[in-house]
Amino acid sequence: MFQDKEKRQRAPNFSSDEKSLVLTLIYDKKHIIENKKTDGVTNNEKEQAWIIITDLFNAQSSAGIKRSVESMQKMYYNQKKQVRKEYANDKIYKRRIEGGPSSMKMKKNLHYELTLANMNQKMMVGLDNIYGGDASSESEVEVLIFP
């Protein structure tokens, strides 16, 4: 019954160089990709930006593996999810030791920095609150700015 359907071929995982290339290409289009609007015009711009990023990636990738738009988006969203999780864990760790040194000093790498540079910083840090609360100050998040 299920023999008629071919099993989907799985592409290999993104290498470290491929991740760096994707995140660098996304940096140039982050104002489009990270836009919170979801109207028709904005969604069309996002689709076009992803197509451009995928075409540039496939042209520049040294691995010779052609990636789809969906696989590029999935890799980026997974990378963002991982960065948010690490940031949240670090925030919990800081509260546990009452504002001591960060546990992330060892974990930070190029992919972490590139993803953080692409993300909306207010989502990670939160807004300032003069009445107290759990929002971090922006000085706690070190962002590496790429040209």
Image (cartoon, grey):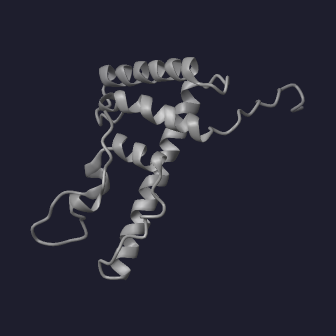
In this picture, residue 98 sits left or right of residue 78 = left
Picture quadrant where residue 64 is located: top right
Image quarter where the N terminus lies is top right
Along the viewing direction, whichever of 81 and 27 lies nearer the viewer? 27
108 with respect to 68 (left or right) = left
Q: Give the number of marks.
A: 0
List x then y, in percent, for residue 106. Answer: 47, 64
Residue extending farthest to the left is: 130
User: Which residue is pictured at 83% across the width and 26% down the height?
Assistant: 6
* Residue at image coords 40%, 68%: 90
Residue 96, horizontal then vertical, whole percent: 37, 81
- Is residue 14 shown left or right of residue 9? left
Q: Position of residue 36 (x, y in %)?
A: 29, 37
Q: Is residue 30 left or right of residue 122?
A: right
Nearer to the camera, 66 or 81 = 66
Question: With respect to residue 55, does 23 lie above or below?
Answer: below
Query: For the point 32% across and 31% down, which residue is it?
Result: 38
Residue beneath the point at 56% across and 29% down: 70
Q: Vertical placement of 123 versus 33: above or below?
A: below
Residue 139 lies, with reference to residue 111, above or below; the image says below
Residue 80 pos. (x, y %): 45, 47
Q: Quadrant of residue 45?
A: top left
Position of the C terminus by quadrant: top left
